[in-house]
Amino acid sequence: MALPSRTRVRSRWPRSLRPRRWGTITLTAVVSRGYDEPSPGATRPGPGRGKALLLPILVVLLTGVQGLIWTQLLPPWYGPDEPQHFDYVQILAVTGRVPSPAPARADGRDLPAEVSCSIYRLGFRSSGPFFAEPPYLPSQMTATCHDPAGRGRRPDRLTNPAGEYGPLYYALALPLWAAAAGKQVEVRLEAVRMLGVLLSVIATLCCYLAAFWAFSGRRELAAATAVVYALQPMASQQSAVVSNDALLFALAAAFFWRLFRALRVPPSAGDLALMGALCGLAFAAKPQGALLAMLVPLSLAPSLHSARWSPDALRPAVGRLVVAAVFALGIALADLAVQRWLGGTAVPGALAGSGPRGLHDYLNGLTADSFHYLYFLFVSSFWALFAWLTVGLPWFVYPAIVGVGVLAAIGLSSGLASRRLDGWAIGVAASSALVSSAGLLALEATFFRRTGQLILQGRSFLIALVPVAILLVAGLTSLAPTRWRGVAAAWICAGAASLAIVSGFSLLEALFA
Amino acid sequence: MRRLAAVLPLVIGLVVLLGAAGAHVEPLVRGSDEIDYTHLSPRSLQPGESVTQPIGPQAPGLSRVEFLYSLDAASPAPVHAVVAAGDRVIVDTDLLLTPTPHPRDAQGWFAPLAVGGTVRLEDIAVPAPAANTVRFTLSVPAGGHAIVLWWNPWLGAHAYRDGGPLPSLERPGEHLAVQTEYGPIEGSLAKAPTFADRIAHYGAPWLPAPVLWLLGGALLALVGAVMWLVAVESGDE
């Protein structure tokens, strides 16, 4: 389906969806599109506003429920880098300053005594062997590390590997930490974990909205995309533990909502300002959030294309890009300034310096052992490798995931060739996934030149989960006959749920058996 | 018809998963700190050779012993296993080990777990539980195929017994990667209340075990409702 021209957009789309003064559209107006206008090809009037809201409400509830379950499937401290992230929150709460960035100390003096005690009691060794199971023998279940006087809450050394991150996520966690301030350390940790659940709900709602625009208002496809996103196992884990990944995912999902909306509604200066602000906030959440800024020009491509790239259209477009850049840079600089003011150092460490290793060495590392590292990045650790990379799924699940991806790719190709799929939406989704992935690999290459280490994991690429989910749903549903596309979307939901349930069973087997 | 077809995979999938969970048996509790998965070293056990690893049970009711192995062969290979407590032989059995892909490097340990099952835990039921130290002996018969066993240089604190972990007889500085399990062996579904209690013990106090059951049921109901509505939505097109 070709994207309507700019003039046709204004006349075809209902009044509630036309750009307002600041280019914003209310949530209710978006999700109740069927209330104003029947979907293309419909033979009956669209459903009412209540019915139109039911699907996204159920998807949001599903996200919240499964988020709460995931917070319990991982024992305290079993989330990646969770001790360090929690310590950052606690240092901010107890001292009012952020920790200085430094590698984890072998002597453990950069962790509070109560955290070290709890970690040891639960069988996790931060400076030694890690055994992927807490102890369940009766003698080990009764001791606590409660420190009513609070003396053990501050580490000897106020350094932390997470110290290079800005304080935005950790500041958002402060009210939750404060609500459990008088409780034992594991309860405080669980309280802070609730922030991730809330952020995952916001992220899923934004994913639904992004897919709604990408699929031209087809709610069933938007819901299927949101379910794939919400139930993605690695994203579920990162949103269920104390980690700034949760905030990054939420901001990225909001960004993609605005990006895919721009396919249908020409973005105004206010829209670009919002996108720039989301990029700046994503950088504040985690530095690789800045990669989203490379995707901002995609929002202008459809309207420029319909205007045939005329100078009259290019000039305001460049102006809007400048607006986006100003907002992005402004927020990023503000974050660095706040971090500096709170006693931290504001330089992301991965980008500085050069070393003896070249691009050829890096590419050898990527492709060695039959592309083993790329398989680790984009298959096993992107989809399901939990609890510090020690709990995986039955091995045959990963090739099955690859198979589903291949099917989706075939569906995308055939759908584009037969024009059943919207080329702009698929192009923006594919470009988003590829550009952000390439950006992450480029960052790793600069780090590799200095240290010779490959540092990425699959969860780093979850910033692009919204476009990946859109591509999966678009590709798989386009393989089905038109009358059965809704059934195909339902089966995709079943597949996502099955993967989530198998992941839950694997965690139960590994950590609670 | 299409709506029923929409929710059918979820129902079938649940039946399959619950069936698999019910068929999967395991004891009540697993020993702690017995295998360090980040510091494993491979050693080949050749035909005619044997290894003996003393094990100090961490709880009463030892019911299963598992050892970590790899087997680079085209067909299953026989080994002989003995579990003895003092002079009393508790288990004396032949096992047929399933082949596994050969692991490349113990440093890349995370990859074999995720990529292809390059190592396996083979379990041996212990019918007559022993409270004191037992000896686990594994040998490859003279005409058999060499297997790879995995070794740790140390164990974790929870594996202590009477002054320290027990090294193997053949390699005094190392411990054979052996996992012990205790309590009655039953289906995973029967163990579900135990899972819920353990999760609730270490989890948030506002999510006790009954709430976890409710959340699980709510998740399944919500997924089913979304699938049904998705199929209904498509019927409006």
Image (cartoon, helix red, strand yellow):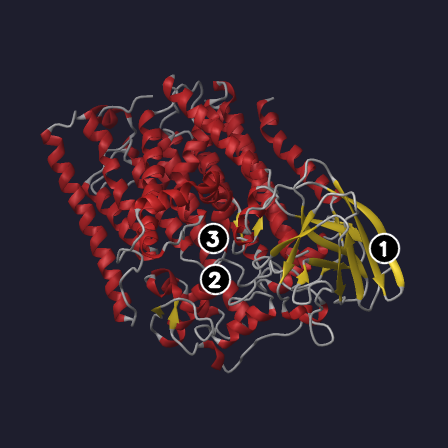
Label drawn at residue A285: none
- Residue plotted at (33% across, 54% down): A447
What amino acid type should be assigned to the residue bearing mark 1?
Answer: Val
**Closer to the observer: label 1 or label 3?**
1
Q: Residues within 10 Å of mark 1 (few under 14, many from 20)?
A: some
Q: Residues within 10 Å of mark 2 (few under 14, many from 20)?
A: many
Which of B176/B196 is in front? B176
What amino acid type should be assigned to the residue bearing mark 2?
Answer: Glu
**Res A54 seen here:** no
The chain ID associated with circle 1 is B
Residue A488 point in image, percent of width and height: 52, 27
Quadrant into which the C terminus of chain A falls: bottom right
Residue A37 position by quadrant: top left
Residue B134 position by quadrant: bottom right
What amino acid type should be assigned to the residue bearing mark 3?
Answer: Gln
Residue B67 point in image, percent of width and height: 71, 54
Are callouts 2 and 1 both on one chain?
no
State yes or no: discs 2 and 1 in contact (Cβ < 8 Å).
no
Which of the two discs, 2 and 3, labels the residue nearer the N terminus?
2
- CA distance separating discs 2 and 1: 43 Å
- Residue plotted at (39% across, 31% down): A35
Residue under numbered circle 1: B91
Q: Residues within 10 Å of mark 3 (few under 14, many from 20)?
A: many
Which of A477/A486 is in front? A477
Q: In this view, does B61 lie above or below A310?
A: below
Name the element at disc 3. helix
- CA distance separating discs 2 and 3: 10 Å
The chain ID associated with circle 2 is A
**Closer to the observer: label 2 or label 1?**
1
Label drawn at residue A238: 3
Label drawn at residue A82: 2
